[in-house]
Amino acid sequence: MLGLMQDWPLTVDRILDHAKANFPRREVVTRSVEGPISRTTYANIWRRAKQVTNALQERGVGLGDRVATLAWNTERHIEAWYGAMGMGAILHTVNPRLFPEQIAWIINHAEDKILFFDTTFTPIVEKIAPLLKTVQTYVAFTDREHTPKSSVTHFVAYEDFIHGHAQEAAWGGFDEHTAAGLCYTSGTTGDPKGVLYSHRSNVLHAMAANQTDVFGCGASDVVMPIVPMFHANAWAISFVGPMCGAKLVMPGAKLDGPSVYELLETEGVTFTAAVPTVWLGLLAFLRENNLRPTTLKRVVIGGSAVPEAVLRAFEEDYGIEVLHGWGMTEMSPMGSVGKLLPEHAAMDHEAQIKTKLKQGRPPFTVEMKIVDDDGKLKPHDGKAFGRLLVRGPSIARAYFKNAGAKNEKGECLEPCGFFDTGDVATIDELGIMQITDRAKDVIKSGGEWISSIDIENIAVGAEGVANAAVIGVLHPKWDERPLLIIEPKPGAQPTREQLLAFLEGKIAKWWTPDDVVFVEKIPLGATGKINKLALRETFKDYKLPSAQAAE
Ligand code: AMP
C-alpha cells in the first residue's frame, strides 16, 4: 500500500521559490568583481534568475543542456545557477585554477553550450575559445561598460544577455532525479571525471548539511561561503542559504586576509566555510594587526585536514567554533563534521581538541564503513585503518559518460554497492571518523602504514613553519620512509634539528621523518590542497641519509 501524501518533487527551484516567498527582502551582498560592494535581495535574485532562464531558452538551451560558469561567488553566479537549474538545464561549474588545456578538455567533454565567466578570467577564456567545440555564446558576468573587447571571440555582457527578458518563467515540473549540476573532480590520476548531481540529491544534501549538528544555520545567520561554488557547490551553501533564509555574503575574487576580514566585520558574518589555506591568511592578518572577529560564531574548515594551530587559534584565541568537515566532490560534498557529542562534554579541553581534529561523524544520509584490501570489514575501534567506503542518496553512483566505470552497468561502485572514497581512515566506537591518509599518499614502511597527514598537522604548528608536507621516499630496507618538506614563514629559518625535536613525543618514534628539506613554496593543487604528486615528482630521486647508510 502506498502512502497518501502529496507528490512534491525535490527540485532545487523550490529552494529559491521558498526564499522569495518567505525571505524576499533578505540581503545578498557581493564584493563585485568590478570592485564595489553590491546589495540585492532573494526576491531580486529570483526575478533575475527567471530572466536568465528566458535568455537561455532564447539561445536554444533546453532540458539537459549544459551551461558552464567560470566564476567567483557572486550574486550573478547565483542567478545563473538557479536560472539554469530551474529550467532543467545543467549548471556546470568549472574550476578556473586548472590549466587552460584541462579547462578546455572539461568544457568539450561536458559539451557546454553557453559559458558565463568573470572578467578576471578573460585571459583564460581567450586562450581556450579556439579549442572549444560546443560553446555558442560567451557571457561576461558584468555590464556592457566592463565587458572586455576580444580579438578572439565575441563576448556578450550579462546585463545585456538578460535585459528585456520577462521576470517570469516556468521552473521545475520534471522528475526530481533530473540532472541539475555538473562538477569535475580535480583528476590527479587520469582525466577529470564529471560528477552529475540531480535535483533530488542536491535538495537532500542541503537538508542533510544544515542539520543542527552539521552547519545548523538559520534565518538569523549571516553566511559567507568563501569556498567557491566551483568547489563542489560551495559545500551546499548556495542551497542552504536561501533554504533557511540566511543573509548571504559573497566574497567575489578577493579571498586574502584583509578582504575576508573586512567583509566579516562590515556585514556581521556569523558563519563561514573555506579550506585551511584561506584561514592561514586570515589568522596571520589578525595577529599582525592585533584584530579579532567580533560577530563570527562558527567556521567550517575542510577540503584538507584542519591544522591543529588553526583549530586552536579560532577556538582558544577568538572563541569561534571550528566545524572540521570532510567530504568530496562525489559526495556533494559533505561526508562528515566533527561536532562534539555529550560523551565528550566531561573531557578536558586537550582531549576535546584532539577529538575535534578528527573528521567527525556522518550526517543522516551518509553511511560509512572501513574495509581491508579484500573488502572485509575492519573494526570501529578508533585504531584499525581501512579504506573508507560510503553510500547515500547524494553520493555518486556513476560518473558522467560512465568514466571510470567499475561494473557493466557503468557504475563507479564496489561490489558491495558502496563508493570507495580513496581515503584511508579509522572509525571509533562513537562513529567518529579520522582520515589517516589518501590511499595513494599513505607511507608504507616495513609493511606498516604511516599517516602523512598526522605528521603534517603537527609539523605545521612548529615555530617558523608556514606549511608542511610529508611524502614517502624510497628506502632500500623499509620500502618507504617519510620525508618532511617545510615551507618556512617569511624571514624564519627553522632547522632540521628543531623540527625533529618538535615532533618528538607527538608521534610514534618510527613515524619520525628520516629527513627534513626546506622549500620556498609547497605546491598547492587547484582546490588549495598540497600537490603531493608534484612533490613526489620533485623528490623522486631524493636519497635519504638513512637510505645511504642502509645500502
Ligand atoms: P575534492 O573532491 O577535491 O573535494 O577532494 C576530496 C578529498 O579531499 C577527500 O577524498 C580527502 O582526501 C580530502 N579531504 C577533504 N576534506 C578533508 C579533511 N577534512 N581532512 C582530510 N582530507 C580531506
Image: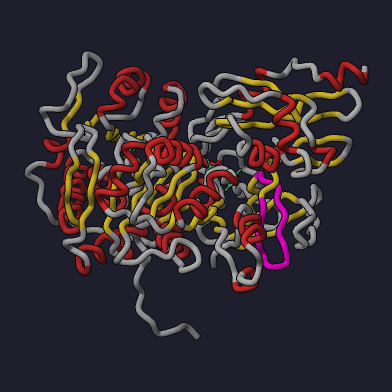
Is residue 387 in view?
Answer: yes
Identify which residue is drawn at 56% across, 24% down: 492
Please state the horizontal and vertical placement of residue 41, each as a whole percent of the image. Answer: 18, 55
**Position above or below: 57 against 369:** above
Please state the horizontal and vertical placement of residue 236, each as a whole percent of the image. Answer: 41, 54
Identify which residue is drawn at 40% across, 85% down: 4
Is residue 173 in view?
Answer: no
- Residue closer to the observer: 280 or 230: 280
**Position above or below: 431 against 447:** below
- Residue closer to the observer: 243 or 249: 249
Q: Residue furthest left?
A: 164
Q: Is residue 206 left or right of residue 366?
A: left
Q: Is residue 155 left or right of residue 438?
A: left
Ligand number 1: quarter of image: top right
Please state the horizontal and vertical placement of residue 200, each as a whole percent of the image. Answer: 42, 61
Identify which residue is drawn at 21% across, 42% down: 56
Query: Does residue 429 show up magenta in the picture?
Result: yes
> What residue span does the magenta drawing correspond to?
422-434
Q: For the stretch drawn in magenta, what is the main secondary structure?
A: strand
Identify which residue is drawn at 80% across, 29% down: 481
Query: Does residue 494 show up magenta in the picture?
Result: no
Q: How many marks?
A: 0
Please state the horizontal and vertical placement of residue 229, each as a whole percent of the image. Answer: 38, 44
**Position above or below: 297 against 129:** below
- Residue closer to the observer: 396 or 96: 96
- Quadrant where the image shows the C terminus: top right
